[in-house]
Image (cartoon, rainbow, N blue to C red):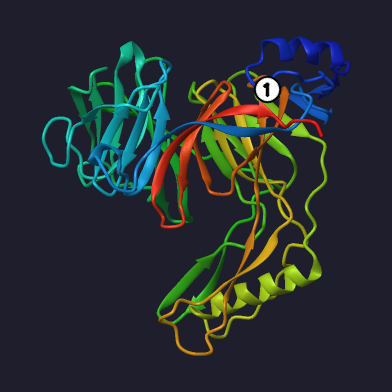
């Protein structure tokens, strides 16, 4: 069943712009249509945006020093989050430490410390803000526990659980529901391979539900090759791969980049966000060089490997999905690449060739939870986005020495020439 509605007009977009946090001064030229396909509502952006122009990030606050007070020296920042009052929470995985700062960047306190006692942790990862002002940090150690703290950082409770799953070895945001349950991302080992999932951990520490990653027919599965003593799996580079995250309410958000379509799996009526745009075509020279490098890499494990499949001729429409604390959907789109040669280290043997990398600048498309396309945000090359709410984003930047800084930036329109 497919039912098509009238297009959204510029007047509707102008009204939306008036209530959307973000760059001011947009001309409200967003044009979109809606469809109902089966039980799914489809909002398709045909042209324009609510903001009326692309936006950029302007730094408002920077926390961090090369040398000085320990509370401002970061080793490896894995998680940055901000509560509704603007306080900034930083997980430094190298120390490890969980540090809290006010909205002006002044250090308030550290929550917990390394160890196994109440409020302590071994491998802190991810932060979730719970009802009533409490907040949680996931300890990805052998104990598998959630530490819950009061607003002042004092230990409130510990939710310890055991399972046979392995968690992702990467920083991640935590998600929670109104009932206080927290979702922890995991990887489940299955006979047909690993499957991503979220565990919902209730306030009493019980695992109440396991949310498996939805499937998508446009996902490109990995392939296996024979190696000495077994088999190895490899993903096809630049092929559409299923990405997913959760909304603040705990509903999956998925997409592969095979087309510009992101689905919010709302109960009752899923929402699919689409945008009319063209894919990035790979130039022949880039495609051949990428394929040669990929084949050489696989042959490191399987010397007899030869590519027999179809190497992609274009990039997926996007490469990453994220949801903001306000429910907005952030989509990092793929752009044309710049070829860069990285000189070998001074310790390398004479004649070692430079390492070739293909670099992209950062551009994120931003959508409201109802599918309205707000516009695109250009981000600095050295900035890693961690958290977003309204007109602000929080993340990490690094200097040429690799020193971490936590920054808050404001979304602003790009000035006209």
Q: Residue at x 27, y 42 (%)?
A: 163
Name which quarter of the figure residue 154 lies in.
Answer: top left
Against 377, is 220 above or below?
A: below
- The quarter of the picture where the N terminus appears is top right
Residue 409 in sight: yes
Q: Residue at x 63, y 21 (%)?
A: 369
Image position, residue 17 (x, y; %)? 73, 15
Q: How many marks?
A: 1
Disc 1 secondary structure class: loop
Against 242, is 376 above or below?
A: above
Q: Does residue 102 appear to the left or right of 219 in the view shown?
A: left
- The quarter of the picture where the C terminus appears is top right
Q: Does residue 212 appear to the left or right of 267 in the view shown?
A: left
Name which quarter of the figure residue 65 lies in.
Answer: top left
- The residue that mark 1 highlights is 23
Residue 38 in sight: no
| Residue situated in front as seen by the camera: 389 or 180 | 389
Q: Residue at x 88, y 16 (%)?
A: 6
Image position, residue 3 (x, y; %)? 84, 20
Image position, residue 130 (x, y; %)? 35, 19
Q: Does residue 325 appear to the left or right of 188 in the view shown?
A: right
Q: Residue at x 30, y 38 (%)?
A: 72
Image position, residue 303 (x, y; %)? 53, 85
């Amino acid at each position: 069943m497919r039912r098509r509605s009238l297009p959204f007009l510029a007047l509707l977009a102008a009204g939306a712009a008036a209530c959307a946090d973000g760059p001011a001064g947009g001309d409200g030229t967003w044009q979109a249509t809606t469809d109902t396909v089966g039980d799914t509502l489809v909002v398709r952006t045909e042209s324009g945006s609510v903001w009326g122009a692309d936006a950029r990030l302007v730094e408002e606050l920077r926390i961090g020093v090369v040398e000085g007070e320990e509370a401002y020296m970061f080793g490896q920042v894995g998680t940055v989050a901000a509560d509704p009052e603007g306080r900034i929470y930083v997980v430094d995985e190298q120390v490890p430490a969980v540090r809290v700062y006010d909205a002006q960047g002044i250090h308030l306190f550290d929550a917990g410390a390394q160890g196994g006692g109440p409020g302590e942790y071994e491998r802190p990862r991810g932060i979730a803000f719970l009802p009533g002002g409490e907040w949680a940090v996931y300890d990805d150690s052998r104990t598998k526990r959630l530490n819950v703290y009061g607003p002042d950082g004092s230990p409130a409770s510990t939710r310890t659980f055991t399972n046979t799953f392995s968690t992702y070895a990467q920083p991640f945001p935590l998600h929670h529901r109104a009932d206080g349950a927290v979702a922890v991302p995991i990887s489940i080992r299955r006979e047909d391979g690993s499957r991503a999932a979220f565990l919902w951990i209730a306030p009493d520490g019980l695992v109440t539900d396991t949310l498996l990653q939805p499937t998508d027919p446009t996902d490109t599965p990995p392939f296996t090759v024979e190696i000495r003593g077994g088999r190895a799996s490899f993903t096809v580079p630049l092929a559409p791969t299923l990405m997913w995250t959760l909304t603040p309410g705990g509903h999956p958000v998925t997409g592969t980049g095979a087309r510009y379509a992101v689905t919010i799996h709302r109960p009752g009526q899923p929402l699919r966000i689409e945008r009319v745009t063209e894919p990035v075509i790979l130039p022949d020279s880039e495609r051949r060089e990428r394929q040669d490098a990929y084949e050489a890499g696989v042959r490191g494990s399987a010397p007899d490997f030869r590519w027999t499949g179809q190497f992609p001729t274009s990039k997926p429409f996007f490469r990453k999905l994220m949801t903001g604390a306000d429910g907005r959907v952030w989509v990092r789109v793929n752009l044309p690449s710049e070829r860069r040669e990285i000189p070998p280290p001074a310790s390398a043997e004479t004649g070692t060739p430079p390492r070739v990398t293909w670099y992209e600048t950062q551009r994120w498309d931003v959508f409201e939870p109802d599918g309205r396309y707000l516009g695109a945000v250009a981000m600095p090359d050295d900035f890693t986005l961690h958290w977003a709410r309204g007109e602000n984003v929080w993340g990490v930047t690094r200097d040429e020495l690799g020193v971490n800084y936590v920054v808050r930036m404001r979304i602003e329109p790009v000035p006209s020439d």
